[in-house]
């Protein structure tokens, strides 16, 4: 339990404001988590790539912070994780896709103290003569 002194929580060597300034109610220290997952494109042609970016709620600690990645479709591949370097708030990764015969939606997720998602649409290539 954090110690409250003069309107602030004392946790380790950091202090955090008390929740709502209510006497006797300590605030909560910030949590390192994924705040957003963004994709450079919302739709691609199968066989092409997009760039994904994970942004954290605060700068990564010494050693960095790993966010675990997953794709909800066999047509979309992401690395198992992406590491945000120490002192940084974001890191990017490559999203690769396979050829598809019909438009396919894939939900990509990033997890670190919670999960956030983004959706990528993979479209079939348009063949010549059609």
Image (cartoon, helix red, strand yellow):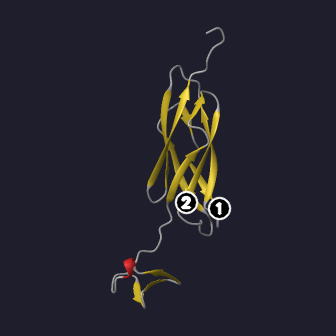
Tell me how many marks there are.
2
Residue 91 visible in image: yes
> Residue 93 placed where, x, y %?
63, 47
SS at mark 1? loop
Above or below — where is 76 with respect to 60?
above
- Residue pointed to by mark 2: 56
Q: In the rendered structure, find residue 41 and report the number of the disc placed on it.
A: none
* Residue 58 occupies quadrant: bottom right
Closer to the camera in the image, 130 or 77: 130
* Residue 27 occupies quadrant: bottom left
* Residue 23 occupies quadrant: bottom left
Q: In the rendered structure, find residue 85 and report the number of the disc placed on it.
A: 1
> Residue 92 placed where, x, y %?
64, 50
Above or below — where is 105 with respect to 125?
below
Disc 2 or disc 1, which is closer to the eye? 2
SS at mark 2? strand
Residue at 49% from the left image edge and 35% from the top image edge = 106
Q: Please tell me how crowded label 1 is: few (under 14), some (14-19), or many (20+) other residues with Cα within 10 Å.
A: some
Rounded to the nearest angstrom, the CA distance separating label 2 from label 1 is: 11 Å
Closer to the camera in the image, 62 or 130: 130
Closer to the camera in the image, 11 or 39: 39
| Quarter of the picture holding the C terminus | top right
Residue at 53% from the left image edge and 84% from the top image edge = 13
Q: Disc 2 or 1, which lies upstream in sequence? A: 2
> Residue 77 placed where, x, y %?
57, 37
């Amino acid at each position: 339990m954090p110690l409250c002194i003069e309107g602030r929580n004392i946790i380790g060597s950091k202090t955090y404001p008390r929740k709502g300034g209510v006497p006797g109610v300590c605030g909560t220290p910030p949590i390192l988590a994924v705040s957003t997952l963004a994709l450079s494109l919302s739709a691609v042609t199968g066989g092409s790539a997009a760039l994904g970016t994970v942004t954290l709620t605060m700068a990564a600690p010494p050693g960095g912070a790993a966010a675990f990645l997953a794709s909800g479709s066999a047509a979309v591949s992401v690395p198992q994780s992406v590491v945000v370097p120490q002192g940084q708030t974001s890191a990017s990764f490559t999203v690769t896709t396979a050829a598809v015969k019909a438009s396919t939606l894939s939900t990509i997720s990033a997890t670190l103290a919670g999960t956030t998602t983004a959706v990528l649409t993979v479209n079939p290539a348009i063949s010549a003569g059609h």
